[in-house]
Image (spheres, rainbow, N blue to C red):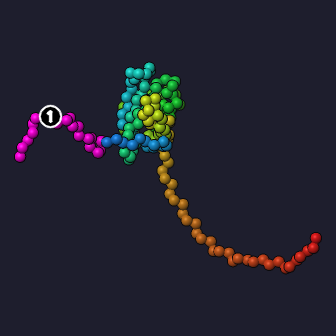
Amino acid sequence: MEWDFGEPEPDFTPPPPAEFGERELVPDGQHEFEIRSAVEGRHKWREGDYLMLQLSAVGKRYSLVFCDIEKGRNGKALAGTLAQALSVDATGKVRLAPEDIEGRRVWAETYQKVGKNGKTYVNVRRFVPAAPPAAPPDKPKPARPAKAATKIEYPNDDIPF
């Protein structure tokens, strides 16, 4: 067998394994998520402090959803819905410590939006209280006996007008 070592092979990058491939975006609607990561911090491109969440859809192979809740007045509504969804008393000023909410499950209503760069992003519209457990199916109603069809016959009553 002869080997040719004269020309180098072109750079070859193997494709990523199927398990790490592209995941589908979370569709619009209400979904159950696990809070995979919660961090307080600042963005390089935005002013202000944020609670930055990474949400993973429970039981489904969707991509992660990133939800940044601004601290202060602008993020008050979204933070309030998160507190309610986590069953935290939100009557006064609420502090959601990242270490207390990591790993917890929460329901959220999501929507997709196309950014200026043409990419589609999944955003959280609001957090919702946990979905109610599925109601047991209704018991079938007992069949009623059919009534005998009663035919009413009227005498021929032609009345001239």
Q: Residues within 10 Å of mark 1 (few under 14, many from 20)?
A: few
> Residue lying furthest left in this view?
1
Report if residue 18 lies within the magenta region: yes
The reply to whether residue 42 is visible in this rendering is no
Residue drawn at x 50%, y 35% as measured from the top left: 125
> Residue lying furthest right in this view?
161
Q: Which amino acid does label 1 sit on?
A: Pro
Instruction: Give how far across and how far down residue 54 sits, in percent.
Output: 38, 34
Residue drawn at x 58%, y 66% as measured from the top left: 141
Instruction: Give how far across and how far down residue 86 sits, in percent.
Output: 45, 37
Q: Tell me: 98 left or right of 9.
A: right
Quarter of the figure that contains the C terminus: bottom right
Instruction: Give how far across and how far down residue 39 sits, in percent.
Output: 37, 28
**Vertical placement of 42 versus 136: above or below?**
above
Q: In front: 105, or 47?
A: 47
The residue carrying mark 1 is 8
Question: Tag 1, which secondary structure?
Answer: loop
Instruction: Give how far across and how far down residue 61 sits, in percent.
Output: 37, 45
